[in-house]
Amino acid sequence: MTGFPTAPDKRALEEGEALTPRFDAAGLVAAVATDADTGEVLMLAWMNAEALQKTIDTGEAHYWSRSRQELWHKGATSGQVQQVVELRVDCDQDAVWLKVRPQGDGGACHTGRKSCFYRAVEGGRLVARP
Amino acid sequence: MTGFPTAPDKRALEEGEALTPRFDAAGLVAAVATDADTGEVLMLAWMNAEALQKTIDTGEAHYWSRSRQELWHKGATSGQVQQVVELRVDCDQDAVWLKVRPQGDGGACHTGRKSCFYRAVEGGRLVARP
């Protein structure tokens, strides 16, 4: 079952106790994953209703792969399963924040780095950052 | 000038020094802002090319308001200007991470909280979290 209710009004959306995610036209919410221990931002991805429900049900991060157009159990092939320590929603419930513990080699990025955000903008160029 | 180049190939996109953001069909990239000092995730918003360029040029976070469909200089009316300490891009350059110092009352959320992510999902319900 992946049907989430809709908030009846703005107050319920922002102050209520019901999880009423606002998926966009493509059926997605943005999801940011941080390392539960260090706070580092690991990745930014997307969830549809099924991915969000499976994340809640299993305690492991599931996303929607926009490139492959399929449900994506993070780590199913790479071993980089993300155990969800806490799942939060933002004020208007169109974004979620996952605090996770990365399993396997501890990474999150397909390039082999721990975080996908390994470059900073400096003077108009990208510079590698630990 | 808000024209960003396009990466010629995947290697340039992921390992190159050129900022070549991949805006989606709506012309946007996702932007997550964290508190530069505490690491707390403050908000998740959107940037078009103009917002990204203005953020880089001014050192203050600019977003694209999807609800108002207009450029949004965060804090211009609320005083919650976000001074950008570092701006990062992710591996495939379709998301940015801003480490910011919130000015004014130190908040980021229109509800008055510091962070927009003030509720966690627990047992299928939303619970307030500091």
Image (tube, coloured by chain):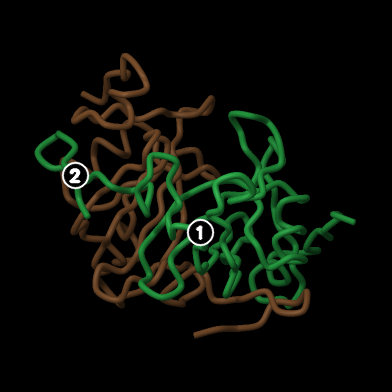
Chain colours: A green, B brown
B66 or A94, which is in the foreground? A94
The quarter of the rendered structure image containing the N terminus of chain B is top left
A78 or A64, which is in the foreground? A78
B27 or B40, which is in the foreground? B40
Q: Which residue is drawn at 37% across and 52% down?
A: A115
Q: Residue at x 14, y 34 (%)?
A: A124
Along the polypeptide, which appears first: circle 2 or circle 1?
A: 1
Q: Residues within 10 Å of mark 2 (few under 14, many from 20)?
A: some
The quadrant holding residue B98 is: bottom left
The quadrant holding residue B105 is: bottom left
Residue B40 horizontal/vertical position (percent): 38, 72
Q: How crowded is mark 1: few (under 14 residues within 10 Å), some or many (20 or more)?
A: few
Amino acid type indicated by mark 2: Ala
Q: Residue at x 77, y 59 (%)?
A: A53
Amino acid type indicated by mark 1: Gly
Q: Is residue B32 above or below residue B90?
A: below
Q: Name the residue under label 2.
A: A128
The quadrant holding residue B115 is: bottom left
Q: Mark 1 points at which residue?
A: A104
- Give the Cα distance between marks 2 and 1: 24 Å
Chain holding disc 2: A
B46 or B10, which is in the foreground? B10
Q: In this view, does B78 lie to the left or right of A82?
A: left
Outermost residue toward the top? B8
Label 2 close to label 1 by CB (< 8 Å): no
Q: Is residue B107 above or below residue A23?
A: below
